[in-house]
């Protein structure tokens, strides 16, 4: 298994929603920060990766939430670059509270993209070695994500603040677009328990996206999501909720 | 003068724009956090204020920026509740870099609003005393803000994530709406040096706002802004820029 890295974080008010719980996009921002800090500590920061003409991009998250941390709470964020194959790097994150209880576990898939080509590149040994991840042959299959039925959607114009250092919309913003369509009443009366999200295509400044969704309220409450530009699928997700 | 309170903060990637500089809304979030921590330390946290049926609301900022801190930089945030009169509390913030150089100075006006009435209330001695602010009779006049000419605007739908613990759009979001209209090319080629902003009316979930602006590029580069719902003015600002 790979090297683990842990840092503590105090949840602050502007990371929380109106109910005082940490927002999912902010949780993702914080865990990604922990992976950047591990990379820095191992001499594999962005400037090292960019010497290869490459940058890290995330293609998948599978998120299990026991509970979202609250405003003011001290949490521990742990990350581990578990394994990798020719193209895909599998990294896990855990969030624990002060009593050592797990708040969330996040499994993710990282790939390397050519900064100029915007294409998938194979993983150089020099980049991955210090993380001591296990080299595997298998490509992990993520759970299949079913498209929302119907054509219920809201449109969002990409904002300047959505664009990150990779010159595209930051991963965490897709969650904003997907969650926001569900509305205030739903979001303040349901708890998000599980998310599978797949990023298919970069979204850039100047784009206007449609956030499609449907909601199935049977034994389980499930929302299904797609982010599209015209007919082009950019991201898709499935979320499970409890009341 | 009032008691001063200082805390350090490390600027992280998700607080920065695509150029790696701290974004104004995040700078505001961080300074407000420092005032909340001072209030907590002095036994005047939100729960204490809410016993009076009141909550703090900000009506003005005058912001001077020497430079925006960069991703990864360590900064010191200092706040002081300088003075107050019957209705208005004047609080300053400073951001300094590691060498003690001032990055920004922010003057602000806080008022107390009835949680149920949503109306301005006078400042109880019990709330303000621990800050050791000077009691003054004078009401400070902020610089007059001139409206943008013309009717150039973009509309923004209030999102769930815009709503804070006060059940209205958080102050920092108005900056997002005002800055975003200026566009990628302008924002990546100009430095914001000065902002005067006045908040006139709360914006709530379900609202759709228009962000009006104009841009004067003479000796000085000045942008003028209004946030409106229909004919109702919600906020207005003037910003000065250098290339």
Image (cartoon, coloured by chain):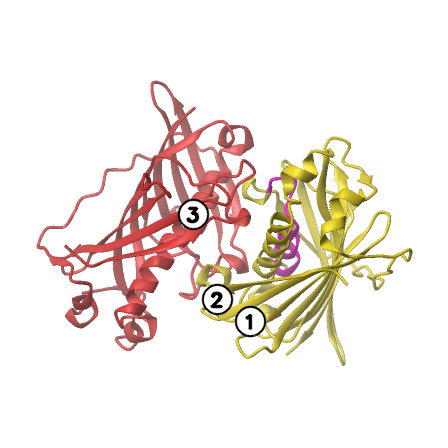
Chain colours: A yellow, B red
- Tell me if B76 is positioned left or right of A104 in this view: left
Q: Residue at x 49, y 65 (%)?
A: A11
Q: Is residue B111 visible?
A: yes
Which numbered dot is residue B74? 3
Q: Which of the marked residues, 2 or 1, is nearer the chain's N terminus? A: 2
In the picture, measured across the screen, residue B58 lies left or right of residue A228, that is left
Label 1 sits on a secondary structure element that is loop
Residue drawn 17% across and 69% down?
B124
Label 3 sits on a secondary structure element that is strand
Badge 2 is on which residue? A18
Which chain's residue wears label 2? A
Give the magenta-colored segment's residue range. A163-180
Dots 2, 1 in contact, CB < 8 A: yes
Q: Is residue A146 left or right of residue B178?
A: right
Mark seen at residue A188: 1
Q: Seen in the image, is B27 located left or right of residue A82?
A: left
Closer mark to the observer between disc 1 and disc 3: 3
Viewer-closest of B101 and A209: B101
User: In the image as oriented, which residue stretches furthest toward the top?
Assistant: B219
Is residue B66 within the magenta segment? no
Q: Please determine if labels 2 and 1 lie on a single subunit.
A: yes
């Amino acid at each position: 298994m790979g090297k683990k890295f842990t840092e503590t974080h105090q949840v602050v008010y502007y990371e929380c929603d109106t109910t005082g719980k940490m927002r999912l996009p902010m949780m993702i921002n914080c865990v990604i920060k922990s992976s950047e800090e591990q990379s820095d500590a191992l001499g594999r920061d962005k400037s090292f990766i960019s010497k290869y003409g490459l940058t890290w991009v995330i293609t998948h998250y599978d998120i299990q939430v026991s509970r979202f941390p609250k405003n003011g709470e001290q949490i521990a964020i742990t990350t581990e670059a578990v394994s990798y194959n020719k193209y895909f790097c599998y990294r896990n994150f855990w969030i624990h509270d002060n009593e050592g209880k797990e708040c969330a576990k996040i499994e993710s898939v990282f790939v390397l993209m050519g900064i100029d080509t915007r294409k998938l590149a194979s993983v150089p040994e020099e980049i991955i070695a210090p993380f001591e991840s296990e080299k595997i042959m298998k490509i992990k299959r993520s759970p299949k994500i079913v498209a929302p039925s119907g054509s219920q959607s809201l449109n969002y114009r990409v904002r300047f603040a959505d664009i990150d250092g990779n010159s595209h919309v930051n991963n965490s913003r897709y969650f904003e677009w997907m969650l926001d369509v569900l509305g205030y009443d739903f979001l303040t009366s349901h708890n998000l328990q599980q998310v599978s999200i797949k990023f298919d295509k970069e979204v850039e400044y100047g784009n206007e996206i449609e956030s499609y969704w449907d909601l199935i309220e049977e034994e389980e409450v499930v929302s299904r999501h797609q982010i599209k530009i015209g007919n082009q699928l950019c991201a898709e997700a499935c979320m499970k909720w409890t009341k």
